[in-house]
Image: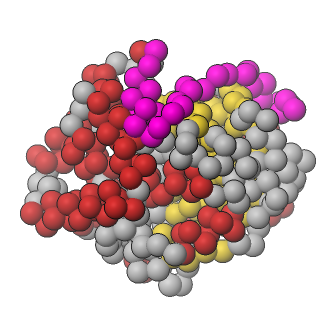
């Protein structure tokens, strides 16, 4: 089925197969990105964080506990990260720190959201259930963003597609598996963290092991979480959920449609969100959340209408919030839009801002 109105062209993902470590090493195949660019976007940011004083003794103690937790509870994720480090000749320790930079900035109470994002899901429509995300992230990742298909002995769901960045583990932004489960995330800067599952490892775990939203929620509710961020989920049967991943507790809603931006909205966790300060992404999070809440319940959504919604700006007709965000250089901006059709097994993907209309289509094997 070809979504009318946006004209996506068929594209092939980066194919990552085999053990988690082999899939990590496979990121460097085909010279899809220069190692220097990956280094700058990952360990280069860690060096800057060290200069800012983020890696003090308490931060290092937390990171050591997190490392021990993930080695015990997610050996597959750590093996993948080890393969990535080997492929790009980067220190594994620094790559692990890079994944926690948002958490470390939260510790200072002055986090800047480089990983923003707007995400939503609907349970039905002309194409069936959809999960949709605008990826708002540092412009440093423009050259290393990619779509990959993962398969291997640890992937019990057959295979999965994911939008991520070279130098970071599998589902670093969003993904959908062959069973029809889609998972997309947003970042939330919070007051409370603890030792537990970091969201970037959690997403790959869900896509590898869970066939539907119910299984994913069972896993999420049964484990501890590092805190910060949300997940929006949908499956081909029409189940949806929005989950706030608090360190003290997780809160989920399952009435369609569901949507999240960059703050907690549940009564249990809302007060845990850090004040936005001068951070424009955090400042407009509530506007984007409100705008999605006004638009989503009143239409049968398909890929073209979802694409148009995610391309809106404050100066476009009837738009009240910047879902499609622009910035210069390495500032946070909309790097891509992912529209997952759970029933069709298709990802419709924009490279760069969705308003530019550069759409690609990736399909999972039947």
Residue depicted at 58% across the width and 46% down the height: 155
Q: Is residue 346 magenta?
A: no
Displayed quadrant of residue 339: top right
Q: Going by the picture, which residue comes out furthest to the bottom? A: 268
The answer to whether 342 appears left or right of 185 in the picture is right
Q: Quadrant of the C terminus?
A: top right
Q: Going by the picture, which residue comes out furthest to the right? A: 126
Q: How many marks?
A: 0
The answer to whether 169 appears left or right of 104 in the picture is right
Residue 85 in the image: above or below residue 315: above
Residue depicted at 40% across the width and 41% down the height: 80
Residue 331 seen in render = no
The answer to whether 352 appears left or right of 256 in the picture is left
The range drawn in magenta is 1-30
**Residue 29, position in %: x, y?**
44, 19
Q: Is residue 4 magenta?
A: yes
Residue 239 in the image: above or below residue 345: below
Q: Going by the picture, which residue comes out furthest to the top? A: 30
Residue 218 seen in render = yes
Between 110 and 119, the residue placed more toward the observer is: 119
Between 120 and 65, the residue placed more toward the observer is: 65
Residue 356 in the image: above or below residue 229: above
Residue depicted at 76% across the width and 44% down the height: 341
**Residue 208, position in %: x, y?**
58, 50
Between 263 and 206, the residue placed more toward the observer is: 206
Between 190 and 333, the residue placed more toward the observer is: 190
Residue depicted at 59% across the width and 55% down the height: 209
Residue 94 in the image: above or below residue 105: above
Q: Quadrant of the N terminus?
A: top right
Tell me how the rendering is colored: secondary structure
**Residue 254, position in %: x, y?**
71, 72
């Amino acid at each position: 089925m070809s979504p009318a109105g946006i004209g996506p062209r068929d594209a092939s993902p980066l194919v990552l197969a085999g053990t988690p470590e082999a899939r990590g090493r496979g990121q460097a195949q085909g010279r899809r990105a220069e190692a220097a660019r990956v280094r700058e976007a990952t360990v280069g940011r860690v060096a800057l964080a060290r200069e800012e004083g983020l890696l003090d003794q308490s931060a290092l103690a937390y990171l050591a506990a997190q490392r021990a937790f993930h080695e015990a509870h997610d050996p597959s994720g750590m093996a993948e990260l080890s393969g990535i480090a080997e492929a790009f000749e980067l220190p594994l320790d620094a790559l692990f720190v890079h994944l926690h930079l948002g958490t470390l900035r939260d510790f200072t109470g002055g986090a800047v959201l480089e990983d923003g994002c707007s995400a939503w899901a609907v349970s039905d429509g002309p194409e069936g259930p959809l999960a949709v995300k605008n990826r708002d992230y540092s412009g440093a990742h423009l050259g290393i963003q990619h779509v990959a298909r993962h398969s291997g002995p640890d992937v019990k769901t057959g295979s999965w597609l994911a939008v991520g960045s070279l130098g970071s583990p599998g589902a670093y932004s969003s993904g959908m598996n062959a069973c029809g489960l889609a998972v997309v995330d947003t970042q939330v800067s919070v007051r409370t963290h603890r030792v537990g599952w970091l969201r970037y490892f959690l997403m790959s775990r869900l896509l590898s092991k869970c066939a539907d939203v119910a299984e994913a929620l069972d896993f999420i509710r049964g484990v501890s979480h590092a805190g910060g961020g949300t997940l929006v989920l949908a499956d081909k049967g029409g189940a949806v959920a929005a989950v706030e991943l608090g360190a003290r507790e997780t809160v989920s809603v399952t009435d369609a449609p569901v949507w999240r931006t960059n703050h907690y909205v549940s009564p249990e966790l809302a007060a845990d969100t850090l004040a936005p300060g001068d951070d424009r992404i955090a400042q407009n999070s509530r506007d984007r959340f409100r705008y999605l809440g006004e638009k989503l319940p009143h239409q049968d959504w398909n890929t073209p209408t979802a694409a148009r919604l995610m391309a809106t700006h404050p100066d476009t007709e009837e738009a009240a919030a910047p879902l499609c965000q622009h910035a210069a250089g390495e500032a946070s901006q909309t790097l891509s839009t992912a529209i997952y059709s759970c029933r069709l097994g298709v990802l419709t993907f924009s490279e760069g801002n969705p308003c530019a209309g550069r759409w690609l289509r990736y399909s999972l094997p039947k």
